[in-house]
Image: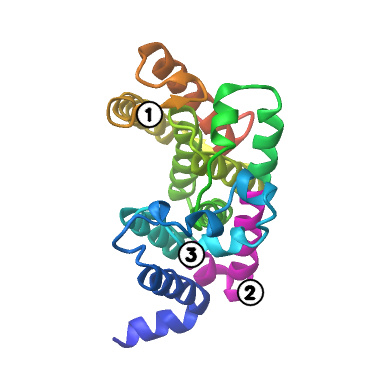
């Protein structure tokens, strides 16, 4: 019990935000009903439609909600993990600034990106630009990407590669508004936390094999269970999945390690 109290004292911001998420979930009923199906959802969710309609407050109000009850687990969990780690390692002030700036930056830059892409007539961009989202996951992910650079090897390389692959793969295989926000957050966070790194050859081979297996399984699995029109096309088609696998396996490691990637003999 004492260790829990000590942890809360060391991570007050993380604990407070997670508590607010749960309180808001109870107060609105979003913990047991779909928030996205409620009449008030459009007034609190953020995205291109919300900001074009002048609902400037939505990046704040939407941060503490999940669109379906099951989404509370990854949203609150990722915040507790990534922002909690930042607060534990770098202090409360750093965690507050990093989380707030990352969340607002990811939301606003995603809106700007979609507005620009929508103007091209790209069918995927037009569709996604018409949707809204809620949650703090993009901000938490960016904080985690920044903090990952401070970890010791081999976990630094593993976590950074995992984050890089996740944001790219989720974007190319699904491409929802949340995936756009995660991609923007991941790119920014990994860039801010970038550092010259050297990965031992054995570890590099291990990471490469795991990456191929995981991304391949994710690509075909998402196409089977979550069919949609991704940025690359119909994700149920083998050609689309294979293209997504190739993009993920090239861009993900580049985000994590940069160019060129140094490998020890």
Give the foreground label among 2 and 3: 3
Q: CA distance from mark 2 to mark 1?
A: 36 Å
Q: Residue furthest bottom?
A: 2
Secondary structure of the residue carrying tag 3 is helix
Instruction: Name the spot of residue 152 as percent of width and height, x first.
Output: 49, 54
* Lower sequence index among marks 1 and 3: 3
Residue position for label 3: 64
Q: Please report the bounds of the magenta region as a residue range.
A: 83-108
Q: Residue furthest front?
A: 39
Residue position for label 1: 215
**Can you say whether 48 is above or below 23 in the image?**
above
Q: Is residue 150 visible?
A: no
Please report contact status of discs 2 and 1: CB closer than 8 Å, yes or no: no
**Can you say whether 20 is above or below 51 in the image?**
below
Instruction: Name the spot of residue 11 as percent of width and height, x first.
Output: 48, 76
Instruction: Name the spot of residue 236 as percent of width and height, x first.
Output: 35, 19
Q: Residue at x 43, y 22 (%)?
A: 245
Residue position for label 2: 93
Q: Quadrant of residue 112?
A: top right
Quadrant the N terminus occupies: bottom left
Mark 3 crowdedness (10 Å alpha carbons): few <14, some 14-19, many ≥20 = many
């Amino acid at each position: 019990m004492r260790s829990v109290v000590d942890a809360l004292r060391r991570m007050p911001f993380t604990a407070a935000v997670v508590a607010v998420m749960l309180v808001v979930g109870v107060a609105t009923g979003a913990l047991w009903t779909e928030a996205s199906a409620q009449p008030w959802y459009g007034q609190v969710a953020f995205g291109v439609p919300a900001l074009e309609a002048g609902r400037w407050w939505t990046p704040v109000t939407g941060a503490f909600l999940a669109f379906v009850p099951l989404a509370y687990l990854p949203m609150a969990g990722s915040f507790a993990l990534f922002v909690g780690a930042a607060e534990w390692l770098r202090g409360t002030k750093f965690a507050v600034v990093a989380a707030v700036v990352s969340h607002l930056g990811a939301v606003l830059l995603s809106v700007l990106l979609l507005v620009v892409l929508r103007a091209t007539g790209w069918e995927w961009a037009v569709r996604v630009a018409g949707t809204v989202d809620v949650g703090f996951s993009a901000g938490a992910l960016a904080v985690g990407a920044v903090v990952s650079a401070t970890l010791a090897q081999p976990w630094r390389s593993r976590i950074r590669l995992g984050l890089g692959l996740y944001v790219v793969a989720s974007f190319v295989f699904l491409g929802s508004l949340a995936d756009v926000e995660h991609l923007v957050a991941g790119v920014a966070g990994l860039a801010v936390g970038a550092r010259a790194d050297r990965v031992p050859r054995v570890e590099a081979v291990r990471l490469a094999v795991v990456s191929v297996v995981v991304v391949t399984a994710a690509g075909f699995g998402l196409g089977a269970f979550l069919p949609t029109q991704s940025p690359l096309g119909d994700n149920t088609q083998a050609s689309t999945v294979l293209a997504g696998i190739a993009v993920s396996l090239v861009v993900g490691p580049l985000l994590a390690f940069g160019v060129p990637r140094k490998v020890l003999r």
